[in-house]
Every structure is written in structure tokens, then in C-alpha cells.
């Protein structure tokens, strides 16, 4: 079994494969721990999906326990909902280690070079490169967990592959003071801020995450939303990172 992509899906798949007796290779393109801006919030049932209780030290210091939603018409809805709040760099590295502990061979800084179907043996030849050293691995099972523009799916199942990304997210990371609750996830369902779903504001440790997503011109939507949040909630400080 070869799993391409060391994010949440790839790491969990590799761990379960190894636990069930498959000789498993898990490869991640980047050197870990690596940053990733998306999906840093999950609900508590997520622990059931990954099959593991998340240690408290793998989560952010501040817990998210409330939600405040702004509807398209401007109505504000509030409620309680406990969420898991984490940095993907810390969380994904922990999942990588769980896969390795289960018996998977985890290799980061390892790029996928090519895939070749060997129909005579009913296997796939996976060519990878780790720090310039190339290797070929034959496998009967291959999982492409390498993102929306997956090279695996593009090569092996082009009929099911959309070559154009459906959208992108942009996050501003702000350090300073704000008239916001550190335990609340703020969600804005307004098309001027996000044409896809909703824009968001919440705290991760000492950084406010102010972000949105769009299928076209995401940076413009992000700048518009950040300006709105800065004025509405009195942000006083500086943006330390944008990604």
C-alpha cells in the first residue's frame, strides 16, 4: 500500500492500513512539520473518524465553545458548540507519528515523480524522490490524498478529475487587541465577503485568524473582509502573516 499525501486523510488511511496488516508507505511532499491554513477547526465527532483521542497539548490553548453566525440579511444567531481548534502543522505531524507507530513507513520531503500501471502484474509502479534520491515502489493499492489537484487522481482517473481548482482560501493572522470573544467562532454568510460559503474570524493561541474563500479573486474578498472586521471589531495591532 502506498499513500501519497501526509495530511489528515493520508495519515489516517496509512495508519488504518498498517494496523490491518498492509505493508504501508506514506509519503509527504514537504518537510514536516509544515504549515497548512485550511481546516484548523473540527467538531468533536472528528475524534471518532480518526479513531484516536486528541491530546490536549496538540490543540490550541484557547478552546472554541460558541458560534456566532451572521446571516445574508444581517441577522445574528448565537449558540453553543464545542469545537476542536488546532494548528495543522502540529496536528498533521501528530497524525504522521501515529501512522508510523502503527507500522507505516513515513517519509517526508518526498516527492511523487511518476506513476506507471503494470497491467501484467496488476500493480502500480510509484516513482518517488527523497532529497534527490529516486526510488521505485510496486504496489497493488494506491491512495491519492495529495489535495484538490491530486497528481495521483489526475494520472490514474483523468475522467473523474477536474483540472481547475474550485476555489482558494486566504487567511490574515492578526496579533493585537480586538472586541471579540476568544472562545467564539464568528461566521459571516454574506456574499460580499465570501461567494462560496462563509467568511470566518476566530482565535488560535495569540493570533486572530480572519479569512475567507472564493473561486475567483480570493485576495480581493479577503482584503474587503479584513477591512470590515478591523473597523467593526476595533482591531488594534498588526497582521503578522497572510497565506
Image (cartoon, grey):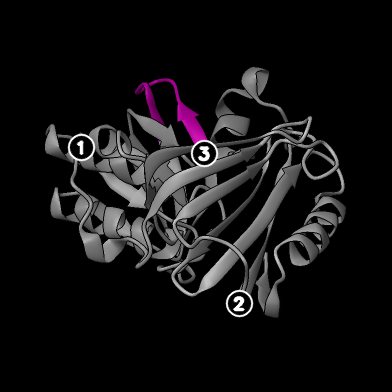
Q: Nearer the viewer, residue 29 or 99?
A: 99
Q: Is residue 68 part of the magenta span, yes or no? A: no
Residue 169 in view in this figure: no
In the rendered image, the residue lying farthest to the top is 159
User: Which mark is nearer the camera, 1 or 3?
Assistant: 1
Q: Point out the tag, 2 or 1, that comes first from the N-terminus.
A: 1
Q: Quadrant of the C terminus?
A: bottom right
Residue 90 image position (x, y, % from top left)? 36, 65
Alpha carbon distance from label 2 to label 1: 37 Å
Residue beneath the point at 39% across and 39% down: 81
Alpha carbon distance from label 1 to label 3: 30 Å
Tell me the magenta residue range.
115-124
Residue beneath the point at 30% across and 33% down: 45
Indicate the quadrant where residue 68 lies: top right
Q: State the SS at label 3.
A: strand
Residue 228 image position (x, y, % from top left)? 81, 58
Residue 137 in view in this figure: yes
Whether 21 is drawn above or below 82: the answer is above
Residue at numbered disc 1:
51
Rendered image: mark on residue 151? none
Residue at numbered disc 2:
177
Residue beneath the point at 63% across and 19% down: 160
Q: Is residue 220 left or right of residue 166?
A: right
Q: State the SS at label 2.
A: strand
Residue at numbered disc 3:
115
User: Which mark is nearer the camera, 2 or 1?
Assistant: 2
Assess whether mark 3 and mark 1 are in contact (beta carbons under 8 angstroms). no
Q: For the residue carrying disc 2, how many other residues have a C-alpha within 10 Å: few (<14), some (14-19), or many (20+)?
A: some
Residue 1 image position (x, y, % from top left)? 29, 36
Amino acid at each position: 500500500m502506498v499513500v501519497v499525501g501526509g495530511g489528515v486523510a493520508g495519515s489516517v488511511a496509512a495508519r488504518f492500513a498498517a494496523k490491518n496488516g498492509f505493508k504501508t508507505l506514506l509519503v509527504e511532499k514537504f518537510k514536516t512539520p509544515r504549515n497548512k491554513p485550511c481546516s484548523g477547526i473540527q467538531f468533536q465527532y472528528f475524534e471518532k473518524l480518526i479513531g484516536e483521542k486528541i491530546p490536549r497539548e496538540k490543540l490550541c490553548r484557547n478552546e472554541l465553545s460558541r458560534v456566532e453566525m451572521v446571516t445574508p440579511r444581517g441577522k445574528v444567531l448565537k449558540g453553543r458548540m464545542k469545537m476542536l481548534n488546532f494548528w495543522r502543522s502540529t496536528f498533521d505531524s501528530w497524525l504522521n507519528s501515529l501512522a508510523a507507530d502503527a507500522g507505516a513507513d513515513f517519509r517526508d520531503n518526498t516527492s511523487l515523480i511518476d506513476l506507471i500501471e503494470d497491467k501484467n502484474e496488476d500493480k502500480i509502479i510509484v516513482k518517488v524522490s527523497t532529497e534527490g534520491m529516486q526510488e521505485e515502489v510496486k504496489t497493488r493499492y494506491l491512495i491519492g490524498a495529495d489535495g484538490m489537484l491530486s497528481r495521483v487522481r489526475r494520472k490514474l482517473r483523468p475522467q473523474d478529475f477536474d483540472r481547475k481548482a474550485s476555489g482558494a482560501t486566504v487567511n490574515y493572522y492578526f496579533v493585537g487587541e480586538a472586541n471579540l470573544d476568544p472562545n467564539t467562532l464568528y461566521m459571516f454568510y454574506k456574499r460580499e465577503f465570501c461567494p462560496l460559503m462563509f467568511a470566518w474570524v476566530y482565535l488560535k493561541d495569540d493570533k486572530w485568524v480572519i479569512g475567507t474563500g472564493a473561486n475567483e479573486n480570493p485576495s480581493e474578498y479577503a482584503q474587503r473582509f479584513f477591512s470590515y472586521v478591523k473597523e467593526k471589531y476595533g482591531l488594534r495591532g498588526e497582521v503578522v502573516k497572510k497565506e
